Image (spheres, coloured by chain):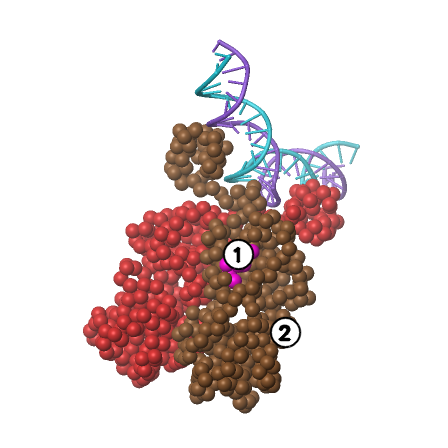
Chain colours: A red, B brown, C cyan, D purple
Amino acid sequence: MAATLHDVASLAGVSFKTVSNVVNGHPHVRPSTREKVERAIAELGYTPNLTARSLRSGRTGAIALAVPELNLSYFAELAGFVIAAAEQAGLVTLVEQTGGDRARELALLRSPRLRMTDGLILAPLGMGQEDAAALDVAFPLVLLGERTFDWPTDHVTMRNVDAARAGTEYLVDAGRRRIAVVGENEDEVMGSARLRLRGYREALAGRGIAYDERLVARATLWHRADGARAMRELLERGVAFDAVFGFNDTLALGAMRVLQEAGVRVPEDVAVLGFDDLDEAAYSLPSLTTIDPGRERIARMAVETLLERLDGGGAAAPPRTRLADFALIERESVAKS
Amino acid sequence: MAATLHDVASLAGVSFKTVSNVVNGHPHVRPSTREKVERAIAELGYTPNLTARSLRSGRTGAIALAVPELNLSYFAELAGFVIAAAEQAGLVTLVEQTGGDRARELALLRSPRLRMTDGLILAPLGMGQEDAAALDVAFPLVLLGERTFDWPTDHVTMRNVDAARAGTEYLVDAGRRRIAVVGENEDEVMGSARLRLRGYREALAGRGIAYDERLVARATLWHRADGARAMRELLERGVAFDAVFGFNDTLALGAMRVLQEAGVRVPEDVAVLGFDDLDEAAYSLPSLTTIDPGRERIARMAVETLLERLDGGGAAAPPRTRLADFALIERESVAKS
DNA sequence: CCCCTTGATTGCATCGTTGTAATATCGTGA
DNA sequence: TCACGATATTACAACGATGCAATCAAGGGG
């Protein structure tokens, strides 16, 4: 099997503790000894057993990241940024998929599997305020993105309401009055759907436009297929609209595809606005005007926050909520007036 | 901190080994004792320390998956399937990003971080045959997808050559004669780019069409932006073509976008064929005809293969190569003749 | 010349588990 | 009542590493 400190020690003719001292850069090691040990290490191809080190130190050097599914581009790109940020801090990342399912999210929070990590970054979708007590866990926990809970936990999120309001105002300023929405989900009491809807309604109210329920289409999951389905539903309803606000890019792209199939011109007849600024948003036809929620910053802040908890010794500091800035990315799917 | 076997034991008034016996379902435990211990476990919220268990058992219950980047949709979707398959087998998955960079791939293979896992599924991009010896590692290793090496390692891959040949023949059968290629990369001696190019050339040869180097555009990375860049280059060259074969969907979509910007109609003027069957390929305008390489099956087979090595006790069985079947998905970006 | 400080090396306990082997307890039949 | 085989429980030693305290050799000052 793999070589241990003892194997190296007997080859080098020193005690295994001396080998440990060499490996850990202990100051008091004679150069000749160090060299002897290093030769033995190289010869045996010794690498420290991180499991044993973890047991001793109480730190694993790994963090867990739980997202609904990697099949959703937003979470895939987010995960990529989290992994990169963690790696820069010398941590590896264990990725879990919850499917956005309440039961799986709750199970994860109690899972002994997390004992293999130093902390968890969780993007919850299914949990609600009634589950907030489940957030009372023994390890550092950072909530990510969407939902807000009335519970003292570190939280990194985006300006959902502000961004949605700004996006809607942008559509109004582009001369649109009947703005449909794709992605509403009244089940998530405090999820991003509700928050973005609030921003939308605030913008309408601010510009003196009446809120029309018939312009709002539901979508519980946010795949392209869900956006397509919602748009078909809107078209079947027969309500007129001159813009669509997709609550994320995949919904918007699915909806845009259905619009175009139906012979509706984008952006001339109907403007389309997304949310997320996925890589693919720049390459659709027309390219998608969208809101960049600052994914990379969110990822970096989440890892930073977790690290502070790790180093700061746990429950010391009060929980923090950190917000990323958003930016409206103007492309072709909304024509400027 | 977290409760240990000892804590539970002193609360229940038994030895810590008895608690261990209860936790592990040891047969000889008196029902009354078991109940007493279980109450104590519940009261303290005890969960076993998996790090300690790993140290003792030599198994961590985690596997590592290394892909170029999650920002590439193909690898994101693949990672999602691998994580799901691993979870079904009771394993968690640690995700690493190599950037497709040779040095990082080699570093990963030697990294002590892998000591926290039971095995590695690696999708190499940068490594070449000259690095094959680096695949001689002490832990179970399964190579994924693309490259083939002359080295005795388990390997799960797709029918790159056959699929590319079939795709090209499909274009020819649709009446196309001057088929451009986006994604060639002569640096990867045995990577998917070379294999897909070989399939393309075999198809041309089989149908009596001359290979024209000017129709081949390079792209070292396979983002949408790379496809767009390659297509601009092709257009600037001024060579006529009536079809484009993108070596993956993101390249094809990037290329298609540039074609349409240039006023070229797809599929009337130029047919576009992709490779991967990403979720988004069904929602572009026009939707993308592409090749489904059997991502989910590949992921499942990779995890299965790794598990066999884990349980089969290592180097016992000879290395295997397993192939997933592909399927051509007909959509709108290629007009049938 | 000896004591004391400094530098170099080592032994031991420990992290929380589990496997093995030893011990303690029990019920049963003679 | 005692011996016996079964069932229950426990003690001890690992797994591979690190922190602490102890040991040992060498060098400097009185």
The residue carrying mark 1 is B303
Q: Amino acid at mark 2?
A: Asp
Chain for numbered disc 1? B
| Spot occupied by residue A120 in the image (x, y as percentages of width and height) | 44, 53
Q: How many numbered tags mark residues here?
A: 2
Residue B61 can be seen in this image? yes
Q: Residue at x 32, y 78 (%)?
A: A259
Name the quadrant containing residue A230.
bottom left
| SS of the residue under disc 1 | helix
The answer to whether residue B215 is above or below residue A191 is below
| Spot occupied by residue B274 in the image (x, y as percentages of width and height) | 49, 76
The answer to whether residue A120 is above or below residue B185 is above
Mark 1 is surrounded, within 10 Å at the Cα level, by few (under 14), some (14 to 19) or many (20 or more) other residues, namely: many
Residue A63 can be seen in this image? no
The residue carrying mark 2 is B187
| Spot occupied by residue A210 in the image (x, y as percentages of width and height) | 20, 73
Q: Residue at x 60, y 70 (%)?
A: B191
Tell which of B41 and A6 is nearer to you.
B41
